[in-house]
Amino acid sequence: MSRRRPPGERGDGAAAAPGRSTCKMNIDMDNSDDKALISEDTAHQISADPWYQVGFVLTTGVNSAYVLGYSGSVMVPLGWIGGTCGLILAAAISLYANALLARLHEIGGKRHIRYRDLAGHIYGRKMYSLTWALQYVNLFMINTGFIILAGQALKATYVLFRDDGVLKLPYCIALSGFVCALFAFGIPYLSALRIWLGFSTFFSLIYITIAFVLSLRDGITTPAKDYTIPGSHSARIFTTIGAVANLVFAYNTGMLPEIQATIRPPVVKNMEKALWFQFTVGSLPLYAVTFMGYWAYGSSTSSYLLNSVKGPVWVKAMANLSAFLQTVIALHSNQIFASPMYEFLDTKYGSGHGGPFAIHNVMFRVGVRGGYLTVNTLVAAMLPFLGDFMSLTGALSTFPLTFVLANHMYLMVKRHKLSTLQISWHWLNVAGFSLLSIAAAVAALRLIMVDSRTYHLFADL
């Protein structure tokens, strides 16, 4: 049982900043007024967005430029049967786990706008801190992966015109981090991304369409394909476990309460609509490009599909630049990957005075967000192993946050209303996904160690 916070205390335990809005979190669900509310313990907007906008945020996440890697990181280690069944099964269990979590958004008479707040309400202060640590790891590794991805897209564009080895991958990653920082300075919070979500969707359609069409053409003109799963028997065990972690990474955020905080009431029903949109129509482009890429190139598929396709230079350049631009937006909008970190920093350390574009608030974002992304960029340039980061993220944060905690929290809150069979089912999920998380973490760390021995730091892959 969590303690009741004294008036004026924020969710992180610190006193609220003077001058910050004191609008209460208890929202009247019968009130038809859709005016955006500001929580007393957040500097960002809540209850501002319709369900379809949230659905597009989730869909943008599923179809980020990461989809260009799933042919190589999921299908190659698992093959046709394992990869196809895995993608469908991962989608089903992810929809189920996220729906459970969405139904816990309103408990104890209030909305819990952060995952750590929800965990703290159910378990207490220690679990609040542990959940925040897991989310931080999740955010940091996903942001690092996005910057690696943007750097790969930039380098692939450069190589199309000048393959002289002058512009190396670490330089491209540094440029990508700088552009991501510029974008972060101008976007104060998630709801401000409305028009950018349209651009993100447009860019996604460009690189997905081009990758699909060029892969189809290459597949038709290359009849002999090898779908043999590569590696020795022992290596296959680790790559298979890593691919399973990539499967859950593909669909999940570990940030669902933060995303749900932006949605208009009724928050549970609207969030379920957004989730169904994500896991049905929203996932079709992912399936199309993943299966087509693997069909065309088999076990030789690159971890970045646009490196495998053949076609006119200007078409491939357009696809790579679209992937780069979408990744910059995705770092901030995709499944709210960067926004929880920014919300924490803005709320805890921001002034709370003036509008989001007041000079002191802009300078604060430049200092804090710029510093955070600088560290992200440095790690990305040092260890540019995109597939390994995807596996490690799935193991250390996606499994615990999306599957283990969601099932156990649902048990804690609803245990008196569940049958014995239902309780057993949730405990099976908790135990099974805990074991998978440990196994996937070991496999991912092994992959990073192997790649670190094969390549040097700041490798030009």
Image (cartoon, helix red, strand yellow):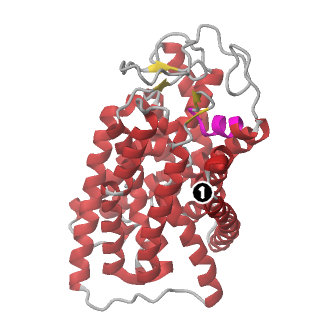
Query: Which one is nearer the viewer's eye here, 31 or 101?
Result: 31
Left/right of residue 453 with respect to residue 284 in the rendered view: right
Pick out the residue farthest to the bottom: 224
Q: Which residue is mark 1?
A: 403
Identified at 36% across, 69% down, the residue is 290
Q: Is residue 126 magenta?
A: no
What's the residue type where badge 1 is placed? Answer: Phe
Report which quarter residue 430 is drawn in.
bottom right
Identified at 37% across, 65% down, the residue is 163
Secondary structure that dominates the magenta span: helix
Total residue callouts: 1
Q: Is residue 409 at all visible to an observer of this figure?
A: no
- Residues packed near mark 1 inside 10 Å, few (<14), some (14 to 19) or many (20 plus): many
Where does the image place residue 108, in percent across and percent down from the top left?
Answer: 63, 31
Left/right of residue 34 with respect to residue 190 in the rendered view: left
Report which quarter residue 400 is drawn in.
bottom right
Q: Which residues are magenta?
A: 113-121
Where does the image place residue 104, in percent across and percent down from the top left?
Answer: 57, 41
Where does the image place residue 61, in percent across and percent down from the top left?
Answer: 42, 50
Identified at 34% across, 66% down, the residue is 287
Q: Is residue 114 magenta?
A: yes
